[in-house]
Amino acid sequence: MKIIFAGGVGEHGRNCFLLQHEHINILLDCGLKKGPIVEYPVLASDQIKALDFIFITHSHADHSGAIAWIQNRGCKAKLVMTSMTKQQIEYTGDGIYLDTNKGNMELSPYLSFSWGRSGHCDGSVWYRLTIGNSNILYSGDYQEHSLAYTCDTIRNQFADVAILDCAYGNRPLRIEESIQRLKKVVATNQFEGQRTLFPVPKFGRGKDLELLFNKNSWVSYIKNPQLKGGLPPAFADCRVVFTGSVERGSFAEQAVLDGTAQLIYYPVHMTLDDVQLLRSLNNFKHTVVFHSGLAFFEDADLNGALIPSLGDQFEVEPTFDL
């Protein structure tokens, strides 16, 4: 079996991994990369048309935003996702919709899989697939310490290849420290008579922040994570704090650069330390890290983990899971 890295490696966005087996072809996520120019997965026409299944981990555009794009190019694959994700992306096509928090399923003589909640947002999951004699674990966006979302922790799993979220790279992000920084900023703003505005995605970390500040009247939220279109007049008196990655060329990026807004990450992904801990708690023959730019791994000890380049191919040597 072969893995082709069609997106999400050495970059933040368009997460997409092609699994080619002699009897079946599978895509793990089908995301796009936002910016001045929208970028789509690096897939050839014959690869797209040969797909049998597309597994979607959650509704965020960097994991699901290229579904319409790939279907418009002749893809007839059946989609696999949770019912919550289907609802969030308003998908109406043919698919297999997972209604339980975790479970397992056989789709063909060559494909079976299990899944569990990944703690990233409503409906988000990780997958472990058995394809022929090969085992692949794909974390999607994974976080064990969310205040709002349950994570079915990945433990004692075997995989020939584990593809693991490492969006924060080698940055020393800890949720406890982020919470203290956010609380301090909100308290300072409140003391100075200023409200704090958190731009958040429609689905995701906003629920964590709402739980964290527990209906504090000095805290507001807007479901517009990049403040596309600028700061609405209703929030003109607020001090803006972004808690996730800002996109190139966005209002959010410019506001952070010119000092009119702050960027304090609220962790909803894994760091390299988290990845290494997960590796120690499981049996992964090979590990691939994705979802982060190469700059975030500068001087990092990857301890054998791989960071492929776009278009790279990896031959999987199957090991029977006994």
Image: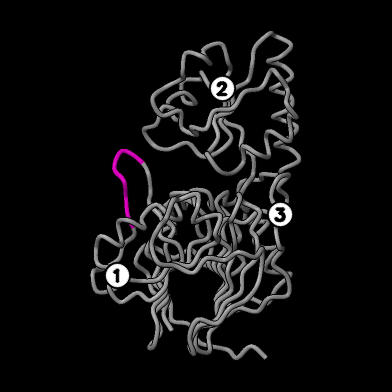
Report which residue position mark 2 lands on: 240
Q: Does 131 lie within the magenta span?
A: no
* Span colored in magenta: 35-40
Label 3: element kind: loop
Q: Nearer the viewer, mark 3 or mark 2?
A: 3
Question: Is 36 displayed left or right of 288 in the figure?
Answer: left
- Taking the spot 70% from the left edge, 18% from the top edge, the residue there is 217
- Taking the spot 66% from the left edge, 63% from the top edge, the residue there is 101
* Residue 82: image location, x then y, percent: 55, 61
Local crowd at mark 3 within 10 Å, few (<14), some, or many (≥20)?
some
Residue type, mark 3 in image: Thr
Residue type, mark 2 in image: Val
Report which residue position mark 3 lands on: 150
Depicted 236 relative to depicted 41: above or below: above
Q: Nearer the viewer, mark 2 or mark 1?
A: 1
Report which residue position mark 1 lands on: 48
Q: Quadrant of residue 209?
A: top right
Q: Quadrant of residue 200?
A: top right
Depicted 182 relative to depicted 40: above or below: above
Label 3 to label 2: alpha-carbon separation: 28 Å
